[in-house]
């Protein structure tokens, strides 16, 4: 099994990025519960034939869709060790929790947070943003909100985020009981950053109308184009208005590791909480989302719930309080920290920072190729590692949507789509450490070839 998966990773470039699952293969996964045992080798053989070839493909250098990390071998091996240990990181006194605390400490160092700041591994940034909003909610309403609920209070809380924010922020408002209607979506400037004047106006008008503004959420690396809000200005606004300052840094926060990009994150060190994913730019295998909170006491007060069966001691296995389950809703928790620890230690953060810089250089190379290709048009300024463009055609949205499907089905490259304003864009997010200029060239050449073929076909 180890040989096969190492071969897979080593030879990934020879494979198609992605291929559709044939009906016959899909049907195999509708089989009944296996009541009888099977040979391990035969189950592994099934995996090799029917699972591995039809995976998402984000380990492949040609994968450029959404924001997916490429994974790495030390991280993969660490997953095997973690599964063998089978540690439960909800709590108790054992070394795996010290590994997680080590990462929390490194995160504090990276972002200039105090020693009293707390952190927690979660599935991904969607979850980390939700937990961040919940801590901010406790900050605004007090711990009483946990028993009384948001409806019991007098205050009508409002939150602020830019129009370029990820959809999970609205979902966090929904799930936290505050409601998406309490989220003020602020327009962006021409660099797709939150418009600070519009933010000020929205806060003032909400106060006039009797609302209680409680959190402003900045984005470090917007999902559509990789814009970074002016975090230092947002920190000032938050301080002046006495708002919680949360940052969605799903992928962009780790640009702190790249010396040529870190200054663009100025102000991140003043956030009250940061959500980020180690499984994106840091290449840790899925999943490794993370939340960092400046006020560790408030973080704990938001989630800790005493129970007789979770009693703490000063010695023995029940020592070591507080436990991770005091900082989030999960009691059973896997050892996500280990693959992160291995990845950071084996490669070192300088090398990860260099990968981050290189993906941004590749994005600029892609931008230059688009600008030099008459059939193509750039749709948004390239600020980080994401490039939005399209093939010029009549009925352009439909043609470009089809081109993206053609590209994915060709197995050559796999970008995704988004909308820039009203226009559908081909969106290439370069995240994978294996991607190089060949893949960028393949994307441009194949886009033009599929675009030309579609236009010719429709003319015929
Ligand atoms: C800016 C931003 N926020 C949040 C998310 C959601 O992160 P996750 O998929 O880890 O939940 C993403 C995902 O790409 C993102 O780009």
Image (cartoon, rainbow, N blue to C red):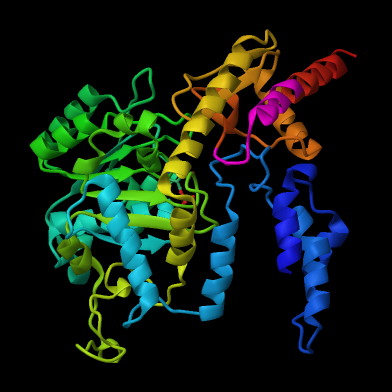
Could you say where residue 291 lies in the image, as x and y percent from the top left? 33, 56
Quarter of the picture holding the C terminus: top right
Q: Is residue 150 left or right of residue 91?
A: left
Which residue is rendered at x = 21% and y = 22% of the image? 197
Position above or below: 284 against 388: below
| Residue in the image at 62% along x and 15% along y | 370
- Among the 4 quarters of the image, the one containing residue 379: top right
**Magenta part of the protein: which range?**
431-445
Quarter occupied by the N terminus: bottom right
In which quadrant of the rendered view does residue 253 lie?
A: top left
Q: Which residue is more in the foreground, 11 or 318?
A: 11
Look at 77% across and 32% down and name the residue there: 406
- Examine the rendered structure and indicate whether residue 230 appears above or below residue 134: above
Main secondary-structure element of the magenta-colored stretch: helix
**Of 290 and 26, the residue lying toward us:** 290
52 on left or right of 240: right
Does residue 437 show up magenta in the picture? yes
Question: In the figure, 315 relative to 102: above or below?
Answer: below
**As rendered, which of 182 and 448 lies closer to the eye?**
448
239 relative to 263 in the view: left or right? left
Residue 296 placement, left or right of 405: left
Residue 265 in the image: state x and y as whole percent. 30, 34
């Amino acid at each position: 099994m180890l040989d096969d998966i190492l071969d897979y990773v080593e030879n990934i470039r020879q494979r198609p990025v992605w291929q559709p699952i044939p009906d016959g293969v899909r049907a195999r996964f509708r089989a009944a519960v296996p009541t009888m045992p099977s040979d391990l080798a035969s189950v592994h053989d099934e995996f090799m034939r029917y699972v591995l070839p039809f995976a998402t493909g984000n380990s492949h250098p040609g994968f450029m869709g959404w924001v997916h990390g490429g994974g790495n071998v030390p991280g993969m091996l660490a997953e095997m060790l973690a599964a063998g240990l089978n540690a439960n990181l909800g709590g108790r006194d054992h070394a795996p929790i010290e590994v997680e605390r080590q990462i929390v400490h490194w995160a504090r160092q990276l972002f200039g947070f105090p020693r009293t700041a707390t952190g927690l591994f979660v599935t991904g940034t969607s979850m980390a943003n939700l937990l961040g909003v919940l801590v901010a909610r406790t900050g605004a309403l007090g711990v009483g909100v946990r028993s009384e609920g948001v409806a019991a209070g007098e205050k009508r809380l409002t939150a602020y985020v830019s129009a370029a924010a990820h959809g999970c922020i609205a979902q966090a408002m929904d799930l936290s009981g505050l409601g998406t209607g309490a989220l003020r979506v602020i327009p962006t400037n021409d660099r797709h950053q939150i418009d600070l004047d519009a933010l000020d106006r929205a806060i003032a008008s909400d106060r006039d109308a009797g609302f209680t503004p409680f959190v402003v959420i900045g984005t470090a690396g917007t999902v559509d184009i990789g814009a970074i809000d002016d975090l230092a200005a947002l920190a000032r606004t938050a301080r002046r208005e006495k708002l919680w300052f949360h940052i969605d840094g799903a992928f962009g926060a780790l640009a702190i590791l790249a010396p040529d990009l870190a200054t663009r994150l100025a102000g991140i060190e003043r956030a009250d909480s940061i959500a980020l994913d180690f499984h994106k730019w840091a290449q840790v295998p899925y999943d490794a989302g993370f939340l960092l909170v400046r006020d560790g006491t408030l973080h704990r007060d938001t989630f800790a719930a005493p129970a007789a069966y979770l009693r703490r001691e000063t010695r023995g296995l029940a020592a070591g309080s507080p436990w991770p389950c005091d900082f989030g809703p999960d009691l059973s928790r896997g050892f996500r920290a280990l693959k992160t620890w291995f990845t950071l230690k084996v490669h070192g953060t300088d090398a990860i920072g260099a990968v981050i810089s290189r993906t941004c250089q590749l994005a600029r190379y892609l931008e230059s190729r688009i600008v030099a290709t008459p059939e193509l048009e750039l749709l948004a300024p390239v600020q980080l590692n994401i490039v939005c463009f399209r093939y010029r055609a009549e009925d352009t949205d439909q043609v470009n949507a089809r081109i993206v499907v053609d590209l994915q089905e060709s197995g050559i490259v796999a970008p995704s789509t988004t909308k820039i304003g009203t226009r559908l864009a081909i969106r290439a997010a370069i995240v994978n450490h294996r991607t190089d200029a060949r893949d960028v060239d393949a994307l441009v050449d194949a886009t033009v070839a599929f675009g030309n073929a579609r236009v010719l076909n429709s003319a015929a």
